[in-house]
Image (tube, coloured by chain):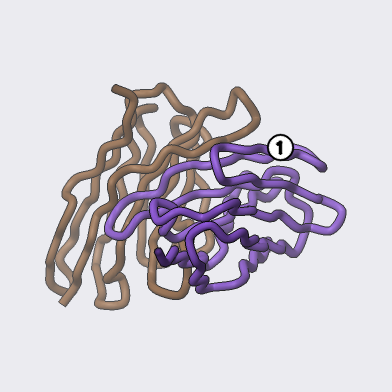
Amino acid sequence: EAQVTQNPRYLITVTGKKLTVTCSQNMNHEYMSWYRQDPGLGLRQIYYSMNVEVTDKGDVPEGYKVSRKEKRNFPLILESPSPNQTSLYFCASSSTGSYSYEQYFGPGTRLTVT
Amino acid sequence: ELKVEQNPLFLSMQEGKNYTIYCNYSTTSDRLYWYRQDPGKSLESLFVLLSNGAVKQEGRLMASLDTKARLSTLHITAAVHDLSATYFCAGINTGNQFYFGTGTSLTVIP
């Protein structure tokens, strides 16, 4: 089954404790992206990647890191989480070959930083 | 930066009625996307509009794109309860960065 998976789905952590949210897709998509969703703000793109070893900042990259060492994986790293990073996070992927860039979203990770 | 504005933000409509959600964007975006999100769920792609004048329909939903007016619409025909969800539009800039609207929360009342 074609899908985007994220782990963990729920995470409660404390300020300053480094964490990684994994994202993996099995569709051989070139484009992968991370978003955060906050009430009243819609989705905001954090980072995106056009292909392996190519990453770009989105609208809200501060406090986040990403890497794209393999085509299928795009982990999101919070080196020193703060309470304002409490949010719902989505990973998405799309093919660039069709020009449409239609995105397929993962199930989401709800992060709480206390 | 590409700004995407949706209206209305909240929409309550009776079953059987028609309505339109509007999505305006600030600068050139030759691709426009519509997504649906059910409460507590992820986003599902509804439509990808790739060119000026594009119109796509799926069931009771029809989306259109006017790139000259920088406007996309999502028209709902004869609403049913199953269409209750939050709908997002999104654009993409020339650097392949996505920008989403804040969403329209649709409630269909029996």
Q: Is residue A28 above or below residue B100?
A: above
Q: Residues within 10 Å of mark 1 (few under 14, many from 20)?
A: some
Q: Secondary structure at mark 1?
A: loop
Q: Position of residue A114 (x, y in %)?
A: 15, 77
The residue where tag 1 is placed is: B50
Q: Quadrant of residue A27?
A: top left
Q: Quadrant of residue B73?
A: bottom right
Left or right of residue B79: residue B62? right
Relative to the observer, which residue lies in front, B63 or A69? B63
Q: Is A69 located above or below residue B26 in the figure?
A: above
In the figure, is residue B101 to the left or right of A53? Answer: right
Name the spot of residue B13 as percent of width and height, x first.
51, 68
Subunit bearing disc 1: B
Of B71 and A5, which appears nearest the observer?
B71
**In the rendered view of the protein, which quadrant contains the N terminus of chain A?**
top left
Q: Quadrant of residue B89?
A: bottom right
Tell me which amino acid carries mark 1: Leu
* Residue at 38%, 70% in the rendered image: A38
Colour given to chain B in the rendered image? purple
Q: Residue furthest right?
A: B68
**Rendering colour (chain A):** brown
